[in-house]
Image (tube, rainbow, N blue to C red):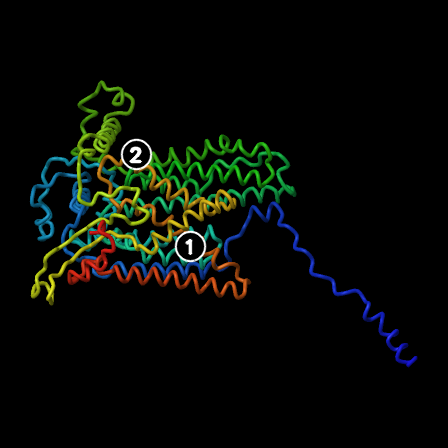
């Protein structure tokens, strides 16, 4: 017994030895590390994902692009204006019956007189590029929309990947946009709004890259001087910021497509300045950080506002280089006008043209106009009133492949995928909370983008407005959904939670794809028995 006690006592020191040391608590990141916040390391995979999804988007959109072989909806303006630019450098008038001549293969029936047009020329020049490549036919005048509709998917993926620091979340955003009905239809129709949407999202992607670039320069400044932070100093004044200049060029091209880009320019210029203030505060500028509004704001104004204005003027080069455009001789006819004496004949004439365009958009003619597909912007986010792009009604059995017993119909409806748009409403609400309450800067981009592309239209609701204007909204809505789905996924090392999140996210993307597939016939002018078409009209306002 004594020996057993002695043995236990001999073992006691081993049992009472210090326990294994717990892992050290990770140190908080330094100021320089927080400023750098590196992008995902899977650069090659990121581009592979981007190109694969872009290929899917392009493949879906190119099938049947040249059908119907006619000018649908406002293609009657933009496809013909583009052809006129291609031939003469400015828009000429067309005679009555010109649409039949164009679709019949004899498009050169323009009149000598100029046409008063109400939108800038960038989108029409791009449409003209497709007509130059493939001819004045439906495929030719829709080809540029196809290309830029696909590029819209690309820039959305890259923007969301950069902001979320996740290739997976960026890919989810690209897939959702690929399966949106409105983005699909606008990428297959020769209208201007798809170009506006692309250049705006490209500009925002450049500003997001500028945010990273600027923070990296601040980190470099601290590292070069061996400083933990700025210690209350303002830091380097970065006058030339390449990504911000690129954003100014893109905003100028967006304005050269449609004027409503100006609201997005203003909103994101202010958001970019807020990022500058936040970066300098993080770097340790202290009370000097808010002065970035002026010290960084002045060069930002030059890079964004002044540069975009210069680019916008440059988009009128064809009109300026010729003499027959509408209002082109105004300066010569008004040599004593102040604008002519200050700017010269050409620029004074261009300024007068802009006044006339503005007068059209705000005048009594447009404000008293009516349209069957007028859609109040209050209903855009919930797809309350889609736009009818084309319709052939009352196709009787035995004609055009209609088998009966019911009559058949062919339609192209500009309709967002409802499951996606309705989910986006909730995602945008969550984005507001996470941005304002959670101080997560990433969610500010979709919130600002949607509001800047949507709210200004309420001040113009006395004139006919159309749902397809919301094409500038959907990339930011998709971004909000993708970022929220990223929250659902959780971190990579979350174990079972990550698996459950992946199932939820996968199910939602599959649901969006299924909803898009169900709507596909009414997005593509497919022959449908009337009851089959009616089954896709879920609400009376959709008819």
Q: Quadrant of residue 82?
A: top left
Foreground residue, 350 or 118?
118
Task: Give neighbour class at mark 2: few <14, some 14-19, many 20+ (Cα, 10 Å).
Answer: few
Element at label 1? helix
Element at label 2? helix
Q: How far apart in space, not on screen, are marks 2 and 1 (Cα)?
A: 30 Å
| x then y, percent, for residue 521 | 22, 60
- 2 vs 1, front mark: 2
Residue occupying the point 8% across, 41% down: 95
| x then y, percent, for residue 451 | 37, 41
Q: To which residue does mark 2 refer? A: 459
Q: Quadrant of residue 117?
A: top left
| x then y, percent, for residue 163 | 46, 50
Mark 2 or mark 1: whose residue is earlier in sequence: 2
The answer to whether 52 appears left or right of 365 in the picture is: right
Foreground residue, 226 or 193?
193
Vertical placement of residue 6 versus 532, above or below:
below
- Tell me the quadrant of the picture where the N terminus can be found: bottom right
| x then y, percent, for residue 290 | 53, 33
The answer to whether 492 appears left or right of 84 in the picture is: right
Q: To which residue does mark 1 refer? A: 482
Foreground residue, 495 or 124?
495
Vertical placement of residue 2 versus 62, above or below:
below
* Numbered circles on residues, count: 2
Residue occupying the point 17% across, 42% down: 371
The answer to whether 27 appears left or right of 310 in the picture is: right
Task: Give neighbour class at mark 1: few <14, some 14-19, many 20+ (Cα, 10 Å).
Answer: many
Mark 2 vs 1: CB contact within 8 A: no
Vertical placement of residue 40 versus 110, above or below:
below
| Residue at far right of view | 2
The answer to whether 485 appears left or right of 262 in the picture is: right
């Amino acid at each position: 017994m004594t020996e057993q006690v002695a043995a236990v006592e001999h073992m006691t020191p081993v049992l009472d030895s210090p326990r294994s040391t717990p892992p050290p608590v990770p140190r908080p990141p330094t100021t320089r590390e927080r400023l750098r916040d590196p992008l995902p390391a899977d650069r090659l995979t990121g581009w592979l994902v981007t190109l694969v999804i872009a290929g899917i988007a392009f493949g879906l959109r190119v099938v049947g692009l040249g059908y119907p072989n006619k000018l649908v909806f406002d293609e009657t303006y933009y496809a013909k204006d583009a052809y006129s630019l291609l031939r003469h450098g400015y828009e000429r008038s067309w005679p009555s019956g010109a649409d039949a001549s164009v679709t019949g293969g004899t498009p050169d029936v323009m009149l000598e007189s100029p046409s008063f047009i109400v939108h800038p020329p960038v989108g029409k020049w791009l449409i003209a590029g497709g007509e130059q490549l493939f001819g004045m036919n439906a495929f030719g005048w829709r080809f540029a929309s196809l290309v830029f509709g696909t590029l819209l998917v690309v820039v959305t993926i890259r923007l969301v990947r950069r902001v979320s620091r996740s290739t997976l979340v960026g890919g989810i955003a690209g897939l959702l946009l690929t399966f949106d009905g409105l983005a699909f239809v606008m990428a297959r129709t020769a209208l201007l709004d798809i170009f506006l949407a692309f250049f705006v999202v490209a500009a925002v992607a450049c500003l997001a890259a500028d945010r990273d670039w600027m923070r990296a320069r601040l980190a470099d400044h601290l590292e070069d001087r061996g400083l933990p932070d700025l210690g209350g100093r303002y830091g380097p004044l970065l006058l030339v910021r390449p990504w911000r200049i690129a954003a100014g060029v893109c905003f100028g091209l967006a304005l050269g497509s449609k004027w409503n880009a100006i609201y997005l320019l203003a909103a994101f210029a202010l958001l970019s300045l807020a990022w500058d203030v936040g970066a300098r505060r993080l770097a340790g500028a202290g009370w000097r950080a808010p002065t970035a509004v002026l010290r960084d704001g002045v060069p930002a104004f030059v890079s964004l506002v002044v540069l975009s204005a210069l680019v916008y003027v440059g988009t009128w080069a064809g009109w300026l280089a010729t003499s027959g455009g509408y209002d082109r001789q105004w300066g010569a006819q008004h040599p004593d006008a102040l604008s002519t004496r200050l700017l010269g004949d050409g620029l004074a004439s261009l300024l007068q043209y802009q006044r006339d365009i503005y007068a059209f958009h705000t005048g009594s003619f447009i404000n008293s106009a009516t349209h069957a597909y007028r859609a109040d912007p209050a209903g855009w986010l919930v797809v309350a009133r889609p736009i009818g792009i084309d319709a052939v009604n009352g196709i009787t059995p035995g004609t055009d492949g209609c088998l009966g017993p019911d009559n058949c119909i062919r339609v192209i409806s500009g309709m967002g995928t409802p499951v996606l748009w309705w989910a986006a409403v909730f995602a945008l609400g969550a984005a507001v909370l996470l941005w304002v309450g959670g101080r997560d800067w990433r969610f500010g981009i979709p919130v600002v983008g949607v509001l800047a592309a949507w709210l200004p239209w309420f001040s113009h609701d006395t004139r006919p407005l159309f749902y397809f204007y919301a094409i500038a909204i959907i990339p930011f809505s998709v971004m909000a959904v993708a970022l929220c789905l990223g929250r659902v996924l959780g971190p990579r090392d979350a174990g079972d939670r990550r698996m459950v999140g992946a199932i939820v996210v996968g199910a939602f993307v599959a649901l969006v794809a299924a909803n898009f597939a169900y709507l596909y016939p009414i997005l593509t002018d497919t022959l449908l028995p009337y009851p089959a078409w009616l089954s896709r009209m879920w609400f009376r306002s959709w008819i």
